[in-house]
Image (tube, rainbow, N blue to C red):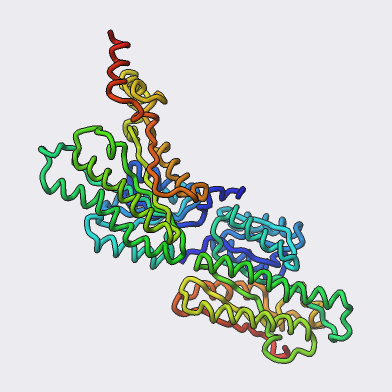
């Protein structure tokens, strides 16, 4: 199976950025979506330098806006044709006791991580179900595996989406041409980290490149042996 | 839809029979440049592989699959292999043919049978295998390469005229029955098309060129690109409401009647 193009949300940094670079390395053209267009343009340059053969399409958008994702997918089709892979990665985090978050932070977390993911998965699965093919990768978190005292609302948003993703996976389990993959990383060295865990040494964190490496392998699983949930861990602290 | 995917074909998969040379290759090239994954199905293995290399060098995605269109089993196997690898087929172009260029009296029965099997049955076998594949996703496009010979007498080849006439009705019948499944079936009928190897001569030889200019209202013979562009249009989203038609691409060649030609000839030559 040759994958021709992928769309990635939250591609301006961290895991999203690492996955975009990995895709480009594997000759997959990428549509990169984030709020920070300057970061996206910089990433696009990096990608073209890495592999001049792939196409890159930067798109400024906000997953909280339901029309933003819809427009993104529509422009992906207009520029790239049929989309093969969608990486649902956009997300934010705050390390605070839940009741200490201010109301804006509560709203942002829920709207970005939960509502934003709902819109993304909604529009993408409609597309994939119509074409009866496509790969959805959801970037989850080990905070869904056990109670998370440090990031409770973040964990709640991730756990909520995990419920939706596993329903999608179950629905299309026997469809050889639709894959729904849940990547579950432990704490990873991204821009979310200072907010997430306060003081922590980088050695206990996972590198975004390693997440990208395993994501690519999961996407390329044989059709009759799909990767369902992939937990990636480093430190036992989290 | 604006953007580079105006035709709605980028990333979709096209299967072109007889795609390793001539018009078939020109079609493959046009689709490949439009961003389609092109599959060339042909009985000629070496030419098939070479043509795929050419498309890849040009920046396209292409693969060759062997097929003997005179055998329904071979067609079935080929389509199965293609679907196994590519999961879906969005466009089928039935272009391959085997013709004798002889009249009914001169050709052998084997020639006649092979011609019908490849040019007519072959197209039918491909449609038969591909329609269920396209039905699964509720959309698809089939284009049959016919000829003005389906409806006017052009040369000596009896088998060619008959096979193309049959192909025209196949187009219409399948369009009717496959339409509800979301599949459009259309035909394209070229008139005179200068073969690539003859283009230089055509451009250089004034006498030869004049003969073509005389009988075409558009004052030239056709090029393979004229045909492949018509196919690009019919395969695209721009033609989403077009099915069961036969698009004649002949520069106006078949507009005139023998009477009109005779009149003109007399006028011009006394």
Q: Residue at x 37, y 43 (%)?
A: B246
Residue A36 position in % (x across, y down):
77, 61
Above/below status of B123 relative to B226: below
In screen coordinates, is B108 left or right of A52?
A: left
Residue drawn where x is 25% and y is 48% of the image: B119
Q: Quadrant of residue B205?
A: top left
Can you see residue A235?
A: yes
Q: Position of residue A118 (x, y in %)?
A: 68, 73
Q: Is residue B100 left or right of residue A207?
A: left
Front one among B66 and B106: B106
Residue B59 is left or right of residue B23, and the answer is right
Q: Residue at x 47, y 51 (%)?
A: B60
User: Residue A26 location in percent, x, y?
Assistant: 54, 63
User: In the image shown, does A55 or B161 lie closer to the viewer?
Assistant: B161
The one nearer the camera, B28 or B182, is B182
Depth check: give the residue in front, B39 or B253.
B253
Please state, as top left, top right, bottom left or bottom right, where the C terminus of chain B lies in the image: top left
Q: Is residue A159 above or below residue A87?
A: below
The number of callouts visible is 0
Is B68 positioned to the left or the right of B196 in the image? left
State whether residue B61 is above or below residue A232: above
Using the rendered image of the protein, determine whether residue B50 is visible from the camera's viewpoint.
no
Q: Where's residue A94, x and y in %?
A: 81, 79
Q: Which quarter of the picture shows residue A196?
A: bottom right
State the residue lying farthest toward the top: B270
């Amino acid at each position: 199976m040759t994958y021709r193009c992928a769309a990635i949300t939250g591609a301006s940094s961290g895991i999203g950025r690492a996955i975009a670079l990995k895709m480009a390395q594997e000759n997959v053209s990428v549509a990169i979506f984030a709020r920070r267009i300057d970061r996206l343009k910089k990433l696009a340059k990096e990608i073209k330098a890495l592999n001049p053969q792939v196409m890159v399409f930067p798109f400024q958008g906000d997953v909280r806006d339901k029309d933003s994702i819809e427009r993104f997918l529509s422009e992906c089709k207009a520029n790239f044709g049929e989309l093969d892979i969608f990486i649902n990665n956009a997300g934010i985090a705050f390390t605070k006791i839940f009741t200490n978050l201010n109301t804006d932070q509560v709203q942002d977390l829920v709207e970005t991580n939960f509502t934003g993911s709902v819109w993304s998965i909604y529009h993408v699965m409609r597309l994939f179900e119509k074409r009866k093919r496509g790969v959805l990768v959801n970037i989850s978190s080990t905070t869904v595996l056990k109670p998370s005292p440090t990031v409770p609302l973040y964990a709640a948003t991730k756990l909520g989406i995990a419920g939706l993703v596993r329903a999608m996976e179950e629905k299309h389990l026997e469809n050889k041409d639709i894959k729904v993959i849940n990547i579950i990383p432990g704490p990873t060295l991204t821009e979310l980290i200072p907010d997430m865990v306060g003081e922590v040494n980088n050695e206990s964190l996972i590198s975004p490149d390693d997440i990208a490496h395993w994501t690519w392998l999961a996407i390329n699983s044989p059709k009759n042996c799909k990767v369902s949930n992939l937990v990636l861990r480093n430190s036992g602290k989290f | 839809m604006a953007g580079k995917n105006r035709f709605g074909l980028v990333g979709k998969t096209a299967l072109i029979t007889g795609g390793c040379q001539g018009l078939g290759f020109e079609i493959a090239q046009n689709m490949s440049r439009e961003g389609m994954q092109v599959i060339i199905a042909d009985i000629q293995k070496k030419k098939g592989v070479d043509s795929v290399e050419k498309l890849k060098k040009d920046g396209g995605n292409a693969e060759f699959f062997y097929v003997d269109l005179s055998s329904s089993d071979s067609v079935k196997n080929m389509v199965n292999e293609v679907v196994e690898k590519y999961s879906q087929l969005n466009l089928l172009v039935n272009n391959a043919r085997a013709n004798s260029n002889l009249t009914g009296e001169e050709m052998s029965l084997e020639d006649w049978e092979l011609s019908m099997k490849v040019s007519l049955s072959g197209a039918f076998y491909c449609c038969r295998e591909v329609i269920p594949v396209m039905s699964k996703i509720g959309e698809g496009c089939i284009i049959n390469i016919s000829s003005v010979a389906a409806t006017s007498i052009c040369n000596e080849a009896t088998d060619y005229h008959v096979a193309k006439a049959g192909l025209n009705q196949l187009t219409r019948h399948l369009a009717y029955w496959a339409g509800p499944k979301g599949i459009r079936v259309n035909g394209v009928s070229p008139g005179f098309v200068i073969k690539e190897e003859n283009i230089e001569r055509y451009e250089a030889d004034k006498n030869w060129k004049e003969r073509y200019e005389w009988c075409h209202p558009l004052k030239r013979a056709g090029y393979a690109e004229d045909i492949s562009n018509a196919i690009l249009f019919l395969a695209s989203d721009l033609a989403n409401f077009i099915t069961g038609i036969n698009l004649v691409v002949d520069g106006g060649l078949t507009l005139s009647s023998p009477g009109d030609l005779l009149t003109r000839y007399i006028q011009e030559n006394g």
